[in-house]
Image (cartoon, grey):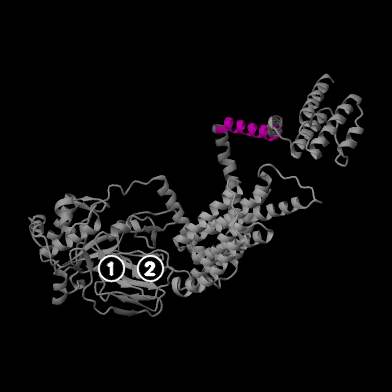
């Protein structure tokens, strides 16, 4: 029981520790130090390591950290929450290694509670719920084991502890945990949210997504694509749901040979939002194919708004947004934990409307035609080769796009050593790369042909559509493509990157990850983002459901009656024998299953007791129950109000009474005296009772 209590406390503290670590905001030294302390405490609880920290050293370390805490708060962390979490984990390490008294164990439980509360503030992900369930299970186990442990230390109380963790105890703890969460879930959806906004401001952004700013270095998006982290959740709301679309974020105009950036920072256009809907264009096409969608952007530390196609309208809970000089949109006042909006767009078509084409000034045209200062001379010949046979600028761009897709390969692996001219190395030596290299190459080659161009960063739709109807856009879907400016057509999208040959290969872990992401979306939608509006919506939906259930039960009853009259006879004819066999098997299992199970379980326990080298009080109880089972077969029942000694005295048959009296004496020696030598004697008496029953 002492070991069970120690491990329950260790599990309680470990679950709180893992909940904080999973938030991704615990610094590495603190995480490693606490993890090592937990491992050492586990070895100590298992009896594999003997360690005891000197009390003076513990006192000195505590006093030293009292002086260090202001330095951490004002200089290192510069924030109350990280500094306080450092303090909690420092105290946890001390208590883990020095806990010996009841007061120490109480401190360990309080520190574990502080850890899970800290994780509640730091993490808004679904994995927090998993660690919370584990925390509650170990909390209940520590309370139960602590009570049994304290009772076992009381000399006036007799406590019999099982040699292994009881299934009854596990079942009780599991049922208690389910009841706690059921009650908590009901209260959560009923009570109004009051602290969500405060916690949202206290929680910093978890995930930083580079590559969506005014500067992108070649290879940067390739590093982003190594991650499978969800970035956006998108739901197509209308009947028209296009596939294989690009979610446009930022566009970059200048290239120095290694990085794209916006050299001329024009003043961003401020767009005021009256209400929640704002128009983004002044001229709209007449016959374009329109669609609309909801976007939920996670906390990616970027204020870029992503749109598919050509955006027309935007619905967002912001006072204003900004339109950049390269046609992108930003929400500078977005909340730090992600935001949501609804976009209304139309798809680009081959037939362009000249009235909608954006007109470039001479200075803008010069900026979009500027070339890197050191350009490989071979690129001019390559641009002519890729556009040979084209009749106009549009055909030149399409020909270049098509031939880059066919002549070069796709890979996410970066060169082993950084080349002096990465673009020339990609085009003439390595001849394979990822989207950044293809987009950069085409943009420069277009400029060599006199076509203004710019590189666009965003995401490519992966077609992933889970059961909840939301498309999950991941960091691995980050993408770069090209926009070329054509006279009377405006900016036209070109994507020279070939398809990834490994894009359609989904392993088991990937499928599990996608299911987890769907669950996390539900968690974000109905737990993290649950507010008064959703509370009212849920109440109205439940009211409509209850009304529908009240009015439809007669229809369901009528449908069931019709099925029983028409379909049941047909099913009985075709599937009668298997059905009858199944019913007979179910009846036999119901009648004979429990006795067979109890008999098998009893035989297993008797075999374990016979082969065991030590005796326990529970073994005496099992053997006594076996003796009562033999007497029951002969019609002799033990009244529940009689003690074993009193029961042995009232048995009418002298021979049987003598055997039961001897068995009771051995039972008492094992049950209360712990005499292992009584076990063989009890088995011998059981065998004699079986033989005596056969003779009778």
Tell me the magenta residue range: 575-595
Q: Is residue 407 above or below residue 101?
A: above
One can see residue 23 in this view: no
Kindly identify which numbered label has been placed on residue 130.
none
**Secondary structure under badge 2?**
loop
> Most extreme residue toward the top, as rendered?
695
Q: Quadrant of residue 650?
A: top right
- Report whether 393 appears left or right of 473: left
Q: Is residue 649 above or below residue 425?
A: above
- Report whether 148 appears left or right of 62: right
Q: Quadrant of residue 247?
A: bottom left
- Report whether 246 appears left or right of 489: right
One can see residue 629 in this view: yes
Q: Position of residue 491 (x, y in %)?
A: 20, 67
Q: CA distance from mark 1 to mark 2?
A: 14 Å
Q: Position of residue 676 (x, y in %)?
A: 76, 33
Q: Quadrant of residue 243?
A: bottom left
Q: Is residue 281 above or below residue 465?
A: below
Ranked by sequence position, the earlier of labels 1 and 2 is 1
Mark 1 surroundings within 10 Å by alpha-carbon count, few (fewer than 14), some (14 through 19), many (20 or more): many
Q: Residue at x 17, y 70 (%)?
A: 354
Mark 2 surroundings within 10 Å by alpha-carbon count, few (fewer than 14), some (14 through 19), many (20 or more): some
User: Looking at this view, is 625 or 461 the one in front?
Assistant: 625
Q: Position of residue 231 (x, y in %)?
A: 38, 61
* Disc 1 and disc 2 in contact, CB within 8 angstroms: no
Q: Which residue is mark 1?
A: 250
User: Looking at this view, is 10 or 229 the one in front?
Assistant: 10
- For the stretch drawn in magenta, the main secondary structure is helix
**Secondary structure under badge 1?**
strand
Q: Is 591 one of the magenta-colored residues? A: yes
Q: Which residue is mark 2?
A: 301
Q: Quadrant of the C terminus?
A: top right
């Amino acid at each position: 029981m002492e070991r069970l209590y120690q491990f329950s406390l260790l599990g309680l503290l470990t679950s709180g520790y893992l909940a904080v670590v999973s938030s991704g905001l615990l610094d590495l030294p603190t995480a490693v130090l606490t993890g090592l302390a937990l491992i050492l405490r586990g070895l100590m609880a298992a009896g594999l390591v003997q360690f005891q920290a000197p009390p003076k050293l513990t006192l000195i370390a505590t006093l030293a950290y009292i002086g260090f805490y202001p330095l951490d708060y004002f200089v290192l962390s510069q924030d109350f929450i990280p500094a306080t979490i450092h303090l909690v984990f420092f105290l946890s390490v001390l208590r883990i290694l020095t806990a010996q008294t009841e007061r120490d164990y109480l401190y360990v439980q309080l520190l574990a509670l502080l850890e899970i509360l800290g994780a509640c503030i730091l993490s808004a992900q679904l994995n927090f719920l998993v660690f919370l369930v584990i925390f509650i299970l170990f909390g209940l186990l520590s309370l139960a084991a602590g009570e049994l442990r304290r009772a076992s230390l009381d000399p006036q109380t007799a406590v019999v502890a099982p040699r292994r963790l009881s299934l009854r105890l596990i079942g009780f703890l599991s049922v208690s945990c389910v009841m706690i969460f059921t009650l908590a879930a009901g209260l959560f959806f009923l009570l109004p949210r009051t602290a969500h906004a405060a916690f949202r401001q206290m929680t910093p952004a978890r995930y930083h997504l580079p590559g969506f700013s005014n500067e992108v270095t070649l290879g940067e998006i390739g590093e982003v694509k190594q991650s499978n982290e969800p970035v956006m959740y998108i739901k197509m709301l209308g009947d028209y749901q296009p596939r294989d679309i690009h979610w446009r974020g930022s566009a970059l105009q200048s290239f120095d040979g290694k990085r794209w950036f916006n050299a001329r920072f024009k003043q961003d256009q401020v767009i005021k939002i009256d209400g929640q809907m704002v128009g983004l264009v002044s001229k709209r096409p007449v016959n374009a194919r329109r669609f609309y969608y909801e976007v939920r952007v996670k906390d990616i530390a970027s204020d870029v708004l992503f749109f598919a196609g050509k955006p027309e309208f935007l619905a967002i809970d912001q006072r204003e947004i900004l339109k950049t000089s390269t046609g992108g949109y930003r929400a500078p006042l977005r909340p730090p934990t992600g935001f949501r909006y609804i976009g209304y767009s139309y798809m680009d078509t081959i037939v362009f409307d000249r009235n909608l084409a954006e007109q470039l000034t001479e200075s803008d045209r010069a900026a979009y035609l500027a070339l890197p200062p050191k350009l490989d001379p071979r690129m001019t010949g390559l641009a002519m080769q890729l556009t040979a046979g084209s009749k106009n600028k549009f055909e030149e761009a399409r020909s270049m796009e098509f031939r880059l897709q066919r002549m070069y390969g796709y890979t996410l692996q970066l060169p082993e050593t950084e080349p002096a001219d990465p673009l020339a190395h990609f085009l003439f030596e390595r001849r394979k790369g990822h989207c950044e290299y293809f987009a950069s190459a085409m943009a420069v080659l277009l400029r060599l042909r006199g076509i203004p161009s710019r590189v666009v960063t965003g995401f490519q739709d992966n077609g992933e559509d889970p059961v909840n109807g939301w498309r999950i856009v991941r960091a691995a879907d980050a993408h770069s493509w090209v926009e070329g400016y054509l006279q009377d057509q405006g900016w036209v999208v070109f994507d020279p990157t070939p398809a990834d040959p490994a894009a359609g290969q989904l392993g088991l872990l990937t499928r599990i990850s996608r299911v987890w992401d769907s669950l996390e979306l539900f968690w974000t939608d109905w737990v993290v983002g649950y507010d008064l509006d959703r509370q009212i919506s849920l109440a109205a939906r439940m009211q409509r459901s209850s009304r529908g259930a009240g009015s439809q039960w007669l229809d369901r009853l009528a449908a069931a009656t019709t099925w029983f009259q028409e379909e049941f006879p047909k099913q009985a004819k075709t599937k009668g024998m298997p059905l009858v066999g199944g019913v007979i098997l179910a009846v036999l299992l119901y009648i004979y299953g429990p006795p067979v199970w109890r008999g098998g379980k009893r035989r297993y326990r008797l075999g374990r007791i016979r082969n065991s080298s030590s005796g326990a009080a529970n073994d005496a109880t099992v053997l006594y129950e076996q003796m009562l089972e033999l007497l029951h077969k002969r019609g002799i029942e033990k009244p529940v109000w009689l003690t074993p000694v009193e029961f042995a005295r009232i048995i009418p048959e002298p021979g049987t009474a003598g055997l039961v009296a001897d068995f009771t004496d051995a039972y008492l020696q094992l049950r209360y005296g712990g005499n292992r030598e009584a076990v063989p004697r009890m088995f011998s008496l059981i065998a004699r009772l079986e033989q005596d029953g056969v003779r009778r």
